[in-house]
Amino acid sequence: MKKILVASAALMIVAGAVSTAPAAEVKPGVQLSGDARVRAVYRDDFDFGNSDKSGETYMDSRVRLNVKGTAAGGAYAIGRIRLQDHRFEDIDTDNAAGAKREDGNIWVDKAYLGIPFSDNFTLEAGKYRVTYGTGFFYEDLNLAGVRGIIKAGNAEINPFIEWMSEGQSSKIKADKNDDNDSIRMGANVSADFNENWKGGVLVAYQTDDRTQFLTDEDGVGYNMEPNEGWLASVYFEGKQGNFGLAGEFAYNDGDLHGFNQARDDNNDDYKDSIGGPDDGYGGYLQPSYTIDALTLALNVGFTMDGFIADPVFGFVMIGQDHSLTVTSVGDHGDWLWAGFIAKYAISDSLSVTGNLVYASVDGWSSTGLDSLEDVIEVSGVLDYTISKGATFSWFAGALFPSFEDSTVNDDPAVGTYGRLQLKF
């Protein structure tokens, strides 16, 4: 009941404050869009030679369909269906019922509705994905809850309340009986300062009422840690003539370390495995300069006290959250990095990008992979537009590490992959 009261009260206040006129009538119907890809991948020593695993090659594919149904008054429902997101092999499982997501061949990763109360206010609720900022901190996160989209001149305000964990779905009896939830509440405010510059601020607080002491079937007790506290970021990007500049600076409570990574949100002692309980913070700046078909950029930044950037932020082997990703920016320790990026458009349909990156790392540990001292990435990307909506991209790179622990192998990670991608 408490969460219903909180959510309902907040939404009614917002709706009442901004709903001054009904939205214009639109043509009802259903729209389909989507994307598809096929990749051929080679990777070797992505653990820097610290196992007996040999180089690997594989192919994979994925099709995603976006379905949007719109009512006559402008209200809409959006879903995204993922089809056969899997490596190539003769899979006879045609029914995903009862299977884990990665074992099935059809599942949904977005399903929500939107109601425009006026031209200036829309309410969205359900399972959605959200990006606030430049991709450094809060990029394409998989969330479930309710959020507002409020237009105010050149500004947009996004208040939200989202459920990280639902007590009624818990396997822990005490959490289910007491309806112990974990909830994130906050707002993002962004604005176009002029036609060339934009920026914003994100502030949120996460609660966690879940059980903090558990006993397993053998009677052994475990102290769990609440994932609660503040998170925030300030960001901007723009250009002036040939010059461009982007940046973001972010903070999260020590109990929220790793909240933006691809892992389940649980209340184990995760923070102690990634740099301790200190509050984490980080940021970056990327100035750039364009000379005809050539764009040069320098990406410099830092992470401190367990802060980890979103997996998609980075270059090719550091970040990007794709087949050649070896590590996220900020993983294994506190980072200070500089990355030189050069992109050249050979023609309207063909471009190449090169990256040279150095990161000094203060590892979280003096042993194992968390004793990382520095990494160097040398990588490149070729992008070719085959036809409108269809592209081919080729990625290649090498990542050279060094470790404080002399017993850890430091073989370079190398890899390459080609990708055919279609957007429709």
Image (spheres, rainbow, N blue to C red):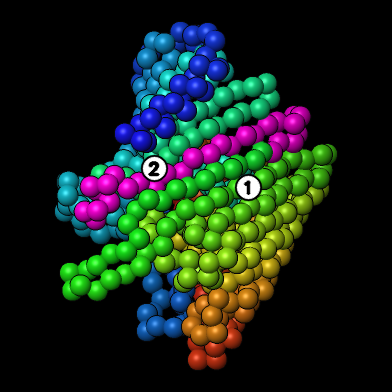
Q: Are marks 2 and 1 in contact (CB under 8 Å)?
A: no
Of residues 281 and 267, the one drawn nearer to the viewer in this rendering: 267
Q: CA distance from mark 2 to mark 1?
A: 20 Å
Q: Residues within 10 Å of mark 1 (few under 14, many from 20)?
A: many
Residue 399, by quadrant, is bottom right
Q: What's the residue at 55%, 91% (across, down)?
A: 406
Q: Is 53 part of what is drawn in magenta?
A: no
Q: Identity of the amino acid at label 1?
A: Ser
Which disc, if any, is residue 233? 1
Q: Position of residue 5 (x, y in %)?
A: 38, 30
Which disc, if any, is residue 99? none
Left or right: 36 as drawn, with respect to 291: left
Q: What's the residue at 55%, 84% (across, down)?
A: 366
Residue 115: in sight, yes or no? yes
Q: Position of residue 28 (x, y in %)?
A: 38, 13
Of residues 51 and 62, the one drawn nearer to the viewer in this rendering: 51
- In terms of secondary structure, where does tag 2 sit? strand
The residues colored magenta run 171-199
Q: Identity of the amino acid at label 2?
A: Trp
Q: Position of residue 12 (x, y in %)?
A: 45, 21
Q: Position of residue 400 (x, y in %)?
A: 59, 77
Q: What's the residue at 35%, 31% (across, down)?
A: 4
Precedes in sequence: disc 2 or disc 1: 2
Residue 359, by quadrant, is bottom right
Q: Name the residue beneath numbered marker 2.
A: 163
